[in-house]
Image (cartoon, grey):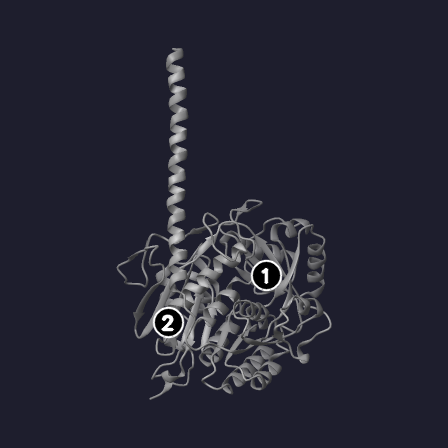
């Protein structure tokens, strides 16, 4: 009997040892797969033949206060609430419910406060948390910083409301006109959460962040006229524009007025100067509809994530328009391709729509990117997508070099590239895929997702800026 017991014990130990070795081999195999992707990116990425030398960036700039979202809500006495998506926030309950909605979906979102007194209470509570950090904030400022880091020879002009603390955080190489200085910083609150983080009965499926703010300068686009007038004097060869999403806290008449000002400013920019518009999370169908109809055809390039893309399709009756309300987790690749194609065909340049200048859409999500272009207008797109996806992992891990096992591949092994596709089996030795559909080029690459992210703020802005700087724009596509 004792012999049997000892034998069973030894067998159990051996089984545990073999299982551990099997797990090690599996992990090693996964690490080799991810290392192959990194090496393939590094071999593929080349700088464009024609580089952008002088860049004007605007117009939303602010100081980010970064804290744990669940710690803040707990300190405010708020537990998980109803899953409700408010267009704007007025009360602590609105903040709790909207944060709950996006926390359990694992989706990035941004909503503004309409009550400055409640927002002041939130910021005062956030400042008392033991763990908090200040960073450069605002899509415009973040894009400017990333370009300054990656391409130090590039001249950059930043237009927007820039307070004293933010000014000290910005690289000295960035030019800031005197008209952009304000006496006190506009503070935006970044409520971060981690992978599988628990908050009451809720669990986050991915690491992400919820952004909220109350400000005067950014939400009213007070720097708009300065932006359009200054870029001429700066002699820009690339323009990066952001901040339109902050208009949704304003009244309809004000929104109409500002959208018209943006439209008129864009129409005065020469066609050989590409203009990139970076979108951010919005909940106002009226504002998104106005941006799609009046602004998107007047920009050359568009950057957006799954929330912004699916909401655009929802508002304008595009493909998979019901996904905005039903989707959970990461979006299916073929559906994103369908929506990008719809944007390019509906709002982009073609012989049937020669007044439009839109020729590029850069979609970025946690697990993959797709860039759709008019191939005669944009070159070096494979390098641009590889550089963007590589940057996503590097910034999230806050590392200059991606290293397994800190990162992991999270796309399916097989997937459709577009609706009707027979399906594609992913090969880590060929991680950047390219295909053409209806005259447009699509380039796809997965993100190596940081397992324990340290820096999720500004990922979309860094990705878009990186992708643009590795892109080669060619105005000759308009020649007859």
Label 1: few (<14), some or many (≥20) within 10 Å?
many
Counting residues from the N terminus, which is met first, the one under dot 1 or under dot 2?
Answer: 1
Q: Quadrant of residue 109?
A: bottom right
Residue 173 image label: none
Q: In the image, 12: left or right of 211?
A: left
Q: In the image, 158: left or right of 444?
A: right
- Residue 335, position in %: x, y? 37, 62
- Residue 179, position in %: x, y? 67, 80
Q: Quadrant of residue 15?
A: top left
Q: Give 303 or 41, whichever is nearer the viewer.
A: 41
> Looking at the image, is 216 positioned above or below residue 415?
below
Extreme residue toward the top, this view: 1
Residue 211 image label: 1
- On the image, numbered disc 2 is attached to which residue? 342
Q: Residue at x 63, y 62 (%)?
A: 135
How many labels were placed on the picture? 2
Q: Quadrant of residue 368?
A: bottom left
- Residue 330, position in %: x, y? 43, 56
Please tell me whether mark 1 sits on a helix, a strand or a loop. Answer: strand
Report whether residue 338 is seen. yes
Q: Residue at x 41, y 43 (%)?
A: 27
Q: In the image, 251: left or right of 424?
A: right
Image quadrant in which the C terminus is located: bottom left
Q: Give 38 or 121, whichever is nearer the viewer.
A: 38
Please tell me whether mark 2 sits on a helix, a strand or a loop. Answer: helix
> Looking at the image, is 277 positioned above or below residue 431?
below
- Residue 209, position in %: x, y? 56, 57
- Asked whether the residues under the numbered discs 1 and 2 touch, taking CB atoms below 8 Å apart as contact, a structural biologist would say no
């Amino acid at each position: 009997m004792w012999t049997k017991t000892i034998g069973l014990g030894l067998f159990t130990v051996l089984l545990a040892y073999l299982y551990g070795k099997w797990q090690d081999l599996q992990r090693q195999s996964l690490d080799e797969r991810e290392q192959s992707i990194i090496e393939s990116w590094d071999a593929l990425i080349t700088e464009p033949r024609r580089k952008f030398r002088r860049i004007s960036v605007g117009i939303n700039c602010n100081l980010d206060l970064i804290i744990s979202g669940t710690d803040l809500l707990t300190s405010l006495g708020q537990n998980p609430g109803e899953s409700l998506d408010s267009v704007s926030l007025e009360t602590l309950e609105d903040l709790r419910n909207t944060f709950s909605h996006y926390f359990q979906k694992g989706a990035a979102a941004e909503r503004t406060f309409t009550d400055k007194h409640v927002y002041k209470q939130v910021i005062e509570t956030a400042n008392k948390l033991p763990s908090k950090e200040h960073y450069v904030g605002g899509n415009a400022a973040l894009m400017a910083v990333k370009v300054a880091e990656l391409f130090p020879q590039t001249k950059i002009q930043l237009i927007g409301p820039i307070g004293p603390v933010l000014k000290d955080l910005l690289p000295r190489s960035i030019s800031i006109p005197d008209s952009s200085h304000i006496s006190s910083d506009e503070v935006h609150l970044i409520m971060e959460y981690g992978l599988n983080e628990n908050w009451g009965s809720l669990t986050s499926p991915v690491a992400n962040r919820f952004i909220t703010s109350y400000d005067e300068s950014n939400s009213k686009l007070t720097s708009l006229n300065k932006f359009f007038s200054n870029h001429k004097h700066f002699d820009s060869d690339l323009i990066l524009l952001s901040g339109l999403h902050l208009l949704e806290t304003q009244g309809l008449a004000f929104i109409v007025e500002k959208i018209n000002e943006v439209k008129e400013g864009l129409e005065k920019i020469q066609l050989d100067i590409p203009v990139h518009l970076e979108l951010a999370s919005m909940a106002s169908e009226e504002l998104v509809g106005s941006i799609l109809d009046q602004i998107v055809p007047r920009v050359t390039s568009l950057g957006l994530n799954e929330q912004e893309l699916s909401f655009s399709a929802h508002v304008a009756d595009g493909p998979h328009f019901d996904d905005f309300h039903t989707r959970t987790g990461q979006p299916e690749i073929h559906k994103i391709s369908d929506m990008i194609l719809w944007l390019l065909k509906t709002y982009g340049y073609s012989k049937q729509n020669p007044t439009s200048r839109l020729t590029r859409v850069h979609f970025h999500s946690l697990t993959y990117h797709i860039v759709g272009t008019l191939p005669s207008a944009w070159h070096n797109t494979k390098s641009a997508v590889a550089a963007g996806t590589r940057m996503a992992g590097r910034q999230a891990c806050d590392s200059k070099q991606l290293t397994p096992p800190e990162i992991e591949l999270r796309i399916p092994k097989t997937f459709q590239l577009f609706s009707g596709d027979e399906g594609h089996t992913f090969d880590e030795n060929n991680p950047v895929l390219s295909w053409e559909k209806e005259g447009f080029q699509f380039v796809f690459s997965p993100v190596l997702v940081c397992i324990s992210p340290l820096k999720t703020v500004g990922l979309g802005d860094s990705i878009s800026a990186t992708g643009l700087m590795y892109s080669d724009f060619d105005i000759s596509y308009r020649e007859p």
